Image: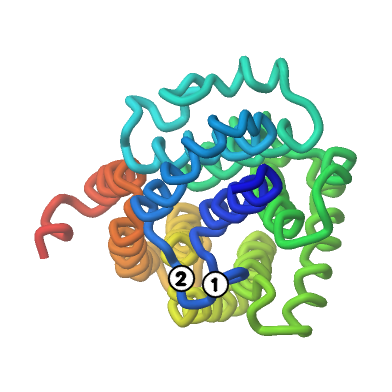
Amino acid sequence: LRQSKVSFLSRLYCFAVTNSSFSHFIPQKAGIPLVQVLRYWKSLYHVMLTQNDTLSLAITLPHMQRVHNYLGLTDDPLAEKGDLIDYGEAKATASGFAILMLKYARMHLCYVFNDYSRGNENIIEPKELKEAPRSIELMSMLYLRAALLIEMVRMNVKRRIHLREVRRIIAKFDQLSKGSPHNLTDRYYLLMAEMSSLNGNDDEAYRNFVVAISVTKKERNLLMHALAQERCALHFLRKASSGQNLIGHESDRELALPHLLAALESYKDWGGVAKVLRLRQSIVQLFGEEVLAQ
């Protein structure tokens, strides 16, 4: 393969990992499991080394490390030092688009594993987003940025500033989703659901979560379906813990359970072993082991 071809393919696989889907390139591959992504990437890795394609390696290695982390091939999925790269050392020497990919990979890991404080430490800033091509890559970065900013608002960090930016990002997704139902519609409804939940609009939040769940199921996007189910469950758990819900404390906890179990199954199908282990532990702590046995 020529180097330009390798670079293109490596980026294709990189964003397949990012979105857990080839739906933007090869529709029938939507929801591709992690083990399959890893197998595809290994077939390119030797070629990239042979061609000395350092740019492609710099772009893809952070995401392949992330795949290893999700597959449970590392002791701590959130550790900066992995079996393929050391994120800290790599960021110290990287520049331009390569450093964007490093931060993007860390943001993604922290979001999926619900470590929002560490995710905020790696968040891509607006000026850095100028390095990203005007494509699906940029919108995926914007989604993660908005999702993490919402969590910062929940922690009362720069509430007004962050809310203003999240609304701008949602407006971009709204415009895209109206152009085509395949234009990250799931992310749009997830962000809308999170914002409604944040504002205490529980019915609207649940409606948007349901749409996101439905869209991701139809698209067979395993990761996004798992995230949509889990985020919906977290919405009910927050309501239950607040003691200010209309349905009632126990009822909200009960409403969360089926979404947690559905998320667990989707994470299993995706191949996210490390995430499955952590989510199982959370479910057991909240509801006991018997719910998993059932």
Q: For the point 82% across and 68% down, which residue is it?
A: 172
- Residue to which mark 1 is pinned: 26
Q: Is residue 281 left or right of residue 173?
A: left
Q: Nearer the viewer, residue 227 or 104?
A: 104
Q: Is residue 237 left or right of residue 121?
A: left
Q: For the point 72% across and 31% down, which residue is it?
A: 99
Q: Are marks 1 and 2 in contact (CB under 8 Å)?
A: yes
Q: Quadrant of residue 267?
A: bottom left
- Residue to which mark 2 is pinned: 29
Gap in angstroms between the C-alphas marked 1 and 2: 6 Å
Residue type highlighted by circle 2 = Lys
146 above or below 74? Answer: below
Q: Nearer the viewer, residue 111 or 56?
A: 56
- Callout 2 crowding tier (Cα within 10 Å): few <14, some 14–19, many ≥20: some
Q: Classify mark 2: helix, strand or loop.
A: helix
120 above or below 17? Answer: above
Q: Classify mark 1: helix, strand or loop.
A: loop
